[in-house]
Amino acid sequence: MSQKHAGSLPPILPVGTQVVVHKPIQDSLGVEQRSAGFVGVIERSPMDLGRPYRIRFPDGEVATVCRFDFEVLSHYKDSVLKKPDSLDMFAHVIYRCIVGSRAFGLDEDASDVDIRGVFLPPASLHWSLSGTPNFIERSDVDECYWELERFLVLALKANPNVLECLFTPLIEFKSAIGEELIEIRDSFLSGFIFKTFNGY
């Protein structure tokens, strides 16, 4: 094995690790034992990176497989079911506002600008296996947005942060759906407020 290949491999994987094979596995006669995509469990790990692993498949059959020919199952799932990049979600913001001290005239020169809002991902992401994030944020500034469904659930529970977002006087942007949200904001004022605001 070349030094380049050895350096590109991760540490030796332990027995019991679930893996998925990248390409067909053949026996010594060239007969295909397993097609690409089969999942197995490492039954024996090699002493060094140059030797193959012994992998057992669900039907009990065993094969020796080179490390380049399989991937850890959890890593494979992460790559296939990759979560949408949160940066892409900012294009789907339907409501943006300023909350906190600056919204209510209590700010000082050093006060942060707290931006909050709601985003609505396209239906294709809701229907996909990867799903949608509950919230997105920009770490370099104090900016956070809730996914619409999550926002509504929190509003129905009289979450103080969400209610502040609905009733702030400083609204920077609202789409047609965002406008509908503001029009029904009084509907979220319930007896839960006594409990949630008391808790704060």
Image: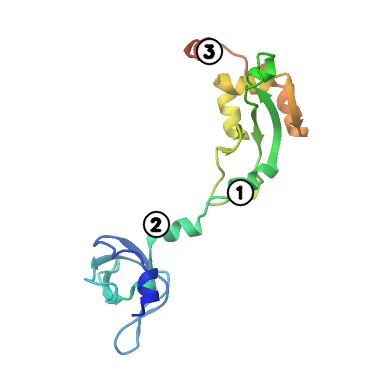
Instruction: Choose top left, top right, bottom left or bottom right for residue 154.
Output: top right
N-terminal of the two: label 3 or label 2?
A: 2
Kindly indicate whether the residue at mark 2 contacts the one at mark 1 (C-beta within 8 angstroms): no
Q: Residue furthest front?
A: 109
Determine which quarter of the picture holds residue 189: top right
Q: Amino acid at mark 1?
A: Leu
User: From this viewpoint, which residue is outermost toward the bottom?
Assistant: 29
Residue 155, image x, y percentages: 59, 23
**Image check: 78 left or right of 134?**
left
Image quarter for residue 193?
A: top right
Would you call the spot at circle 3 few (<14 residues within 10 Å), some (14-19), or many (20 or more)? few
Q: Residues within 10 Å of mark 1 (few under 14, many from 20)?
A: some
Q: Position of residue 4 (x, y in %)?
A: 40, 75
In the image: residue 154, left or right of residue 104: left
Counting residues from the start of the chain, the first of labels 3 and 1 encountered is: 1
Question: What residue does disc 3 label?
Answer: 197
Q: CA distance from mark 3 to mark 1?
A: 34 Å
Residue 95 screen position, x and y as percent: 70, 32
As drawn, 173 above or below 99: below
Badge 2 density bin: few <14, some 14–19, many ≥20, Cα 10 Å: few
At horizontal 64% and vertical 44% (from top left) the residue drawn is: 89
Identify residue for label 1: 125
Q: Which quadrant holds the N terminus?
A: bottom left
**Which of the two labelled residues, at mark 1 and mark 2, occupies the earlier sequence position?**
2
Callout 2: SS: helix
Q: Which tag is nearer the camera, tag 3 or tag 1?
A: 3
Residue at 78% x, 33% y: name it.
176
Give the amino acid at mark 3. Phe
Foreground pick, 170 / 73 = 170
Q: Which mark is residue 74?
A: 2
* Label 1 element class: helix
- Compared to residue 176, the image places residue 123 above or below, namely below
